[in-house]
Every structure is written in structure tokens, then in C-alpha cells.
Image: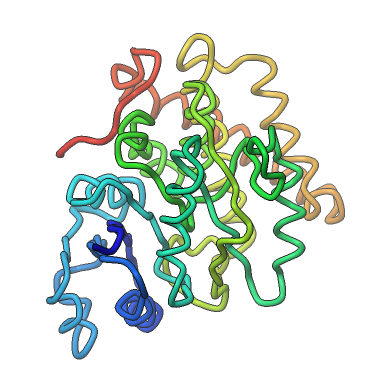
Amino acid sequence: MNPQLSVVIPTYKRTDSLERLLDRLASQVGVELDIIVVDQNGPSFFAGSLLQKLGRINHLQSIAPNASLARNVGFLQAKFSHVLFIDDDLVPEPDFCWKGLQIFAGHPLIKCFVPLVFPEGGRAEWINFMRNKRIAYYPGDNNIFAISDSISAAVFFEKEYFKLSGGFDIYLFDFAKAAEDKELFLRMLKKDMTLWYVPYVEIFHDEGIDGGCEMRTVGYWATRKKNLRAMAFHNRVHSVTPGILSIKSIFNIARSAFLNKKAISSGISNLLREVSLMRQSIKESKQYFEQYKEKYSKTFAVFIKKT
């Protein structure tokens, strides 16, 4: 019997790339797939051949556009013992899923890993980037290493290990529309869970696709606002006293505001705008945290639950 993998795809405002991904998954070799698409669009968004393909798999309708919620809802429907979370603008080769499952089979210490997610011509650049996040090598295999954080465009989990993580933070995404992956991996580190990086399992990222969270296609200041809001909120969540920003956290938020390339090179007016965004993010994150502080009253919140 072929190894089995559940594949969770959150989708929002994309059609062509989603259909391409479904076609690529349909042609995967050596695996049995349980494909779950969590649709964050309106009920009549899809049509034609794509709608027909969605009718042949597990097509769920999400209650709101929230990537964290979509991933968690999809996970609850997963049938198999291993799960792949994958974004709808990725392009897997026919053996991608099989290679992912072979990593689990051949490396018993690995319960969660990210593959090499690369843009056009960007393999070496991204491997070097991830090496800067290296914590430790896998015993006996220096091609695999544990990392401090990553992106969630594609991530493989043993099902029980994802449960242990608590899932993606739905409140963070609702507030900031960004950085839910970084928060998850930070939480995993605090739980002594290990995130591995396997660069020889790779998948292409089509950066020319609009839609999704639109971090690559919206304007610079909209992106800065999302990033600063995300940083302010997850620093509140992970504070020694949840909800209270430490001096160190405020310093890190300020450093993000002032030491990005745009702010450094763009003059005093844009620096002042960064200051305004930072102050607004700190203020609004406090107000928002107050609404959900009971969710974080324990050491770690759990977001994998039916809503």
C-alpha cells in the first residue's frame, strides 16, 4: 500500500494557481492523498472546471478569510497520520509528496519539517537564508538542520505533533493578517518542539500570483502596518506576563520600524510615519489583546477546535 498524506490547502482570491496545484497533486506518484481545500471566498467564487475538481475532493467553506482558521479547520478533517499544509500558489513536482513522507520514514527524530520553498532562480539564496536560522544539525546528516523559524507556505507534520503545537493562532491573524507562521514556530520552540529544514525536498513558489494574503502585492505601508501589528501582538502573547510588553519587546518592535531598508533610506517623513505606525500598533494590540486575554491565560493557547 502506498504511504498516505493529508494535504490542507487554504485558498483565498485565487483560481488559476489553485487549479494548477490540484492538477499537480492529482499527478503525484507513489502516495495516496487526502486533499482538503478550505475555501475562504464567497460560496459562488469558483466555477467551471475548477468547481468540478473541487467537487471530487474535500471542499470546505470557511466562515471568514483567516488563514490560521482555515489551516486549523482543514487539519480537523485530515484522515491520515501525516499532514502537509501548502499554499495555493506553490507548484510541486510529481514526487514531492512521496519525498516528504520518505523523510519521516527515514528520520525518526523528525516530526515536523519545511522543504525548500524557492522562487524563480532562488534555490541557493534561500538555502543560505535558512542556514542563518540553523540551531543544530540532524544526527549523522548535515544536509538537514533544525531552525528557529520559517514560513508556512509548505510544512509537513506528523498529525499528533501538530496537535501538540496547539495550531495556528486565529486571533493573531484576525488582528494582523500576517506572521501566524512565525508565531506558531516560536511557540513550538517554547514547547521544546523541533522544526527541521530539509533543502533536498523542494517546491517552487510562484511569486507572480495575486490574491492570498496579498503581502507581496499590496503597497509598502500596508505591509508595514501588518508586520508591526503582528509583532506587537505576538510579543504580548509571549510576554512573561501575557499582555504586557517588556522593554526588550518594545526595543525589538522599534528596531523593526527603524532598521528596515525603506525607512533608513527614505528620509525623515517616512521615519515619522514608521513611528506613528509603531505607536498605533502597540496601542491597538493592547486593546485587541484585552478582548481575548482569557484565551492566553494558560501558558500556551490551543486553537485546534471546532468553532
* Image coords of residue 273 (percent x, y): 69, 46
Quadrant (top left/top right/bottom left/bottom right) for the C terminus: top left
Quadrant (top left/top right/bottom left/bottom right) for the N terminus: bottom left
* Image coords of residue 120 (percent x, y): 66, 77
Q: Residue furthest front?
A: 1
Left-right relation of 287 to 247: left
* Image coords of residue 242 (percent x, y): 46, 14
* Image coords of residue 295 (percent x, y): 30, 22
Left-right relation of 150 to 88: right
Q: Residue furthest bottom?
A: 48
Rendered view: 45 above or below 281: below
Q: Residue at x 77, y 54 (%)?
A: 128
Q: Residue at x 38, y 82 (%)?
A: 20
Quadrant in which residue 167 is drawn: top left
Q: Residue at x 70, y 59 (%)?
A: 126
> Looking at the image, which is closer to me, 187 or 266?
187
Q: Residue at x 26, y 65 (%)?
A: 33
Rendered view: 225 above or below 305: below
Here the colouring is rainbow
> Looking at the image, which is closer to me, 37 or 6?
6
Total marks in image: 0
Q: Residue furthest top?
A: 241
